Image: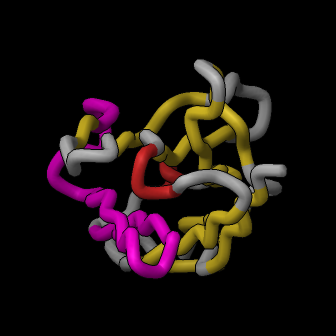
Amino acid sequence: QVQLVESGGGLVQPGGSLRLSCAVSGVIFSSNTMGWHRQAPGKQRELVATISSGGSTNYLDSVKGRFTISRDNAKNTVYLQMISLKPEDTAVYFCAAVVRGGWRWGQGTQVTVSS
């Protein structure tokens, strides 16, 4: 079955940077659209960024210019580079893969932006 394992979260000061990684197994990784979602306390999960099998990317407006999604098909890994982090970026971040027409998520990794 599909397994997605995130890493790289943590506590960072406003203006800081983090890079999230997600190791994927159980799917033909290079053929799948991948994404990152996030969920802040008391809020709905939202789609932050996607990357297609061909490398096309899309971003939530509030993270454009600050977040970059990328993939390494040789390593079955997807990344989310985050710079200029803001307190409102605080959330649990979930790696996700499109499987049979729907999103499948990992367990998530906490990102906290605070001074």
Q: Residue at x 55, y 53 (%)?
A: 28
Residue 21 horizontal side relative to residue 14, left or right: right
Residue 34 horizontal side relative to residue 40, left or right: left
Q: Is residue 30 above or below residue 51?
A: below
42 or 74: which is nearer to us? 74
Q: Is residue 53 above or below residue 70?
A: above
Q: Quarter of the image for the C terminus: give it.
A: bottom right
Residue 57 percent coordinates (x, y):
23, 42
Q: Is residue 95 above or below residue 100?
A: below
Q: Residue at x 60, y 80 (%)?
A: 8
Number of numbered labels in the structure image:
0
Residue 111 percent coordinates (x, y):
62, 65
Q: Is residue 74 magenta?
A: yes
Tell me which colouring the rendered structure shows: secondary structure
Start and end of the magenta stretch? 59-83
Q: Is residue 26 magenta?
A: no
Q: Residue at x 84, y 50 (%)?
A: 1
Q: Quadrant of residue 99?
A: top right
Residue 7 horizontal side relative to residue 84, left or right: right
Residue 112 percent coordinates (x, y):
63, 66
Q: Residue at x 51, y 57 (%)?
A: 29
46 or 84: which is nearer to us? 46
Residue 15 horizontal side relative to residue 11, left or right: left
Q: Is residue 111 above or below residue 115?
A: above
Residue 43 percent coordinates (x, y):
70, 26
